[in-house]
Amino acid sequence: MKISYLELSNSIKNNNGLVLVLKTLDKAITYITVLFYLGLLVYAGFQIPVSGATLLYRSIVIPGISFAFVSYYRKRTSSPRPYEVYGFQPALDKDTVGKSFPSRHVFSIFMVGITFFQVSIPLGVFILVLGVALAIIRVVGGVHFIKDVVAGALIAIIIGVICFWVFCGIFGLLMLPF
């Protein structure tokens, strides 16, 4: 059985409770991730006397440059969103034109999850699970296509593996600019 975005959006919008749950989870997951990331930065700051600034540096520079790259790419390509293509009002509050591919929300949460692997694998996995939930919410809410959220997650994973594990882990590079 094939279901269209319009049918999915209409069925969700006809259920006020479901719309409220989607909106609440979308915001909650985003804020929880921000709080966890800020906690990681504070923890990394406290680690400076013990192990230097490497953890703090990596935890800011790699996600920061990656976020800027994804933002620039998405602005340049400006792919339309599902509600633009199919002409419906999404369940999630969104009126942005274009800039759908890749999903920056999903990219960000996956990048934060991967950044956490430096200090805690269980917390990293927890955040990645939240990322999967957020990806589903963003698609079901009508603000992203499946390809948008998958691309956001994959870009974060690829950048994380290359930067955190290959450059920093295998080669032992600090990735410092000096």
Image: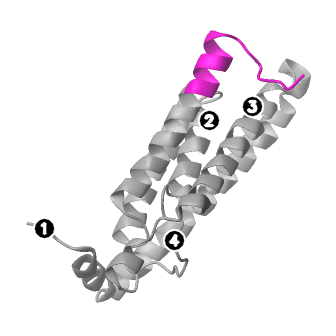
Query: Residue extending furthest left?
Result: 1
Q: Which residue type carries mark 4? A: Gly
| Nearer to us: label 1 or label 4 | 4
Q: Amino acid at mark 1?
A: Lys
Nearest-to-viewer mark from 2 and 1: 1
Tell me the residue that label 2 is attached to.
116
Q: Which residue is mark 1?
A: 2
Q: Quadrant of the C terminus?
A: top right
Q: Is residue 167 above or below residue 30?
A: above
User: Percent from the top left, x then y, of residue 92?
Assistant: 46, 78
The quadrant where residue 19 appears: bottom left
143 left or right of 164?
left
In the picture, which quadrant includes the N terminus?
bottom left
Q: Amino acid at mark 2?
A: Phe
Residue at 47 percent across and 65 percent down: it is 79
Q: Secondary structure at mark 1?
A: loop
Residues at discs 1 and 4 in contact (Cβ within 8 Å): no
User: Can residue 111 be seen here?
Assistant: yes
Residue 72, by quadrant, is bottom right
Q: What residue did someone put label 3 on? A: 58
Three-letter code, disc 3: Arg
Question: Earlier along the polypeptide chain: callout 2 or callout 4?
Answer: 4
Q: CA distance from mark 4 to mark 3?
A: 31 Å
Q: Is residue 152 left or right of residue 82?
A: right
Q: Name above or below for residue 51 compared with residue 135.
A: above
Residue range corresponding to the magenta coloring = 162-178
Give the number of the mark in front: 2 or 4: 4
Q: Contact (CB < 8 A) between labels 2 and 3?
A: no
Neighbor class of circle 3 (other Cα within 10 Å; few <14, some 14-19, many 20+) is many
Q: Which residue sits furthest top?
A: 171
